[in-house]
Amino acid sequence: MLTRDIPQEEKFGVIQSIMLSREAAQEQKLASMLLSNTALSGSIPQEEDKKVSIINNMLLGRNNPHEDKLAGMLQRNKEWARKVRYEQPNFFSNSAKGQSPKILWIGCSDSRVPAEQIVQCAPGDLFVHRNIANLCLHTDMNCLSVLQYAVDVLKVEHIVVCGHYGCGGVKAAIANQFHGLIDSWLCNIKDVYRANRSHLEAVEDISARQDLLVELNVGNTVHNVCHSPVVQAAWERNQPLSVHAWCYGLEDGLIRELGLVVSKKNEVEAVYKMEVIDKTLSTKASESH
């Protein structure tokens, strides 16, 4: 049937369908070209099913702002990987051989405090653990497992506990509001407040009081790290290890040293000191690697 034989009210719909079909075909072709280019760089396998899946994801997500944001992240990753390969051809092959960071970073989960970025470290320089308000609890197997791996296997020489002023976890701990499950976590910060109530309440300005609690909370985490059997066993076998208290400023991007550094067991309060009978006990994990 010729186009002129189609009623006027239907003609527009037919033409629009043809144009949309052509547009989709062109987009699929472009996506295929981009995929082929990526495959040539060696960063994505060329199996047909994976190519089809990626193309479909590109097409289906083109009008979804959330998908566009994720696609942008993936694209920036490709650009970053390409730049690194150009500047340091052996970077990824060397990285794949293993890691040997000398610093364990215990920080807050806040998205504004990315560890590697604020101290300009490259991948492989830091071993990182982050949680809300940078806590280390004696019952937190997640943090303690990271601590043991860092100390016993990676043999880090420094543990940096870095909090930040304006911490939402600290603010929530001070407020007498119900937040749900997280309140159990925040209770640990409330304990720090209770132990230092007189000093904190002597500060009239609420913002300054919150900043002081941020610093006290960092100090408490440093002490908890030092009280752990993993760290004390390391000191017992004369492994070089220091624990540092730092605090990052959101308003100026600068890190303040809080003047607290613990490097040996005799700097720990007597009640927390442990006599390690079997000095090899905490190194069992490293023997399996």
Image (tube, rainbow, N blue to C red):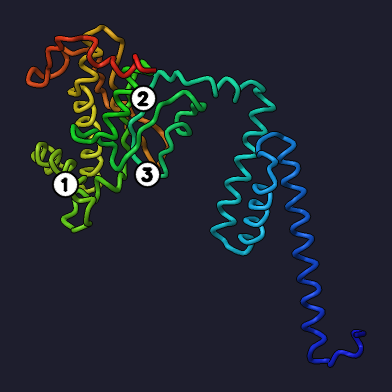
Mark 3 — residue? 110
Residue at 15% in and 38% down: 192
Instruction: Look at discs 3 and 1 and give the one toward the viewer.
Output: 3
x, y percent for residue 255: 37, 31
Furthest toward the top, the residue is 238
Give the Cα separation between the discs numbered 3 and 2: 18 Å
Residue situated in front as seen by the camera: 9 or 246 = 9
Three-letter amino acid code at the position of disc 2:
Leu
* Secondary structure of the residue carrying numbered label 3: loop
Q: Quadrant of residue 197?
A: top left
Work out whether mark 3 precedes mark 2 in sequence or the reverse, and give the earlier one: 2
Q: Is residue 53 above or below residue 115?
A: below
Give the Cα separation between the discs numbered 2 and 1: 35 Å
Mark 1 — residue? 204
Q: Quadrant of residue 83?
A: top right
* Secondary structure of the residue carrying numbered label 2: strand
Q: Is residue 242 left or right of residue 34?
A: left
Three-letter amino acid code at the position of disc 1:
Glu
Residue situated in front as seen by the camera: 264 or 167 = 264
